[in-house]
């Protein structure tokens, strides 16, 4: 299922976003190892491959995480994942950019949010050993991530007024936060 998820993501995401998805999985897995958090690897990987699939094609008044979660729910259903696993993946995706997601909302939701936070804003990047950071960036280069992601985020904020992307763009200054992340591009 993980291989199929990556193939589906290749069809839906640019190389920049695909590498971002891969990095988010690795960052989340590294945080799990450092904090002793148990999680279902394959379900976190599927969530990582799908969590931004709705971002490249904004729909007025529909949060991209809702679109992404629905794609993942359909994918996992086709792969015979039981309902609780499908919802675990969909919830992790829907929650991933909600501020304050903690382990109490599920290990996979916390790790996806944490992994995405490392990659986009540099949050928790200080807990990931330097050698791991360098290895991940070498394996999955950023390819101009900051520029592409900032543009997609602004488009989402315009399409979904008062949505989470709009809120974070307006009040958390995402463009500035992304530029200040401790990665070169």
Image (cartoon, grey):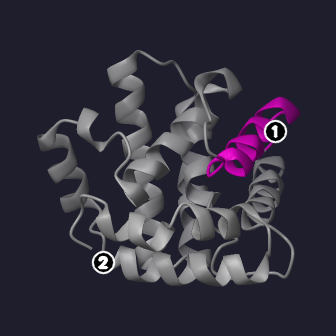
Above or below — where is 22 with respect to 184?
above
Residue located beneath label 2 in the image: 143
Question: Which residue appears at 70% of the width and 71% of the height?
Answer: 54
93 drawn magenta: yes
Disc marking residue 87: 1
* Quarter holding residue 119: bottom left
What's the magenta bit mostly, secondary-structure-wise?
A: helix
- Segment colored magenta: 80-98
* Quarter holding residue 172: bottom right
- The kind of secondary structure element at disc 1 is helix
Question: Which residue appears at 52% of the width and 84% of the height?
Answer: 151
Disc on the earlier residue, 1 or 2 = 1
- Asked whether 61 or 110 is in front, the reply is 61
Q: Position of residue 159 (x, y in %)?
A: 77, 82
Q: Position of residue 108 (x, y in %)?
A: 60, 33
Above or below — where is 22 with respect to 32?
below
- Asked whether 98 or 71 is in front, the reply is 98
Question: Which residue appears at 85% of the width and 82% of the height?
Answer: 60
Residue occupying the far top of the picture: 36
Above or below — where is 149 with respect to 48?
below
């Amino acid at each position: 299922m993980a291989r199929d998820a990556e193939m589906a993501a290749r069809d839906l995401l640019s190389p920049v976003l695909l590498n971002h998805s891969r990095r988010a999985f690795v960052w989340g897995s590294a945080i799990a190892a450092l904090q002793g958090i148990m999680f279902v690897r394959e379900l976190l990987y599927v969530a990582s491959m799908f969590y931004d699939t709705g971002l490249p094609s904004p729909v007025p008044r529909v949060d991209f995480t809702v679109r992404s979660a629905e794609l993942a729910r359909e994918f996992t259903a086709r792969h015979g994942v039981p309902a609780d696993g499908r919802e675990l993946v969909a919830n992790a995706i829907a929650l991933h950019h909600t501020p304050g997601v903690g382990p109490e909302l599920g290990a996979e939701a916390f790790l996806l949010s944490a992994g995405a936070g490392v990659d986009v804003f540099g949050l928790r990047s200080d807990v990931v050993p330097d050698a791991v950071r360098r290895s991940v960036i070498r394996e999955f280069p950023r390819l101009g991530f900051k520029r592409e992601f900032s543009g997609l985020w602004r488009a989402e904020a315009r399409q979904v007024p008062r949505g989470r992307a709009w809120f974070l763009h307006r009040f958390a200054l995402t463009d500035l936060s992304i530029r200040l992340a401790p990665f070169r591009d």
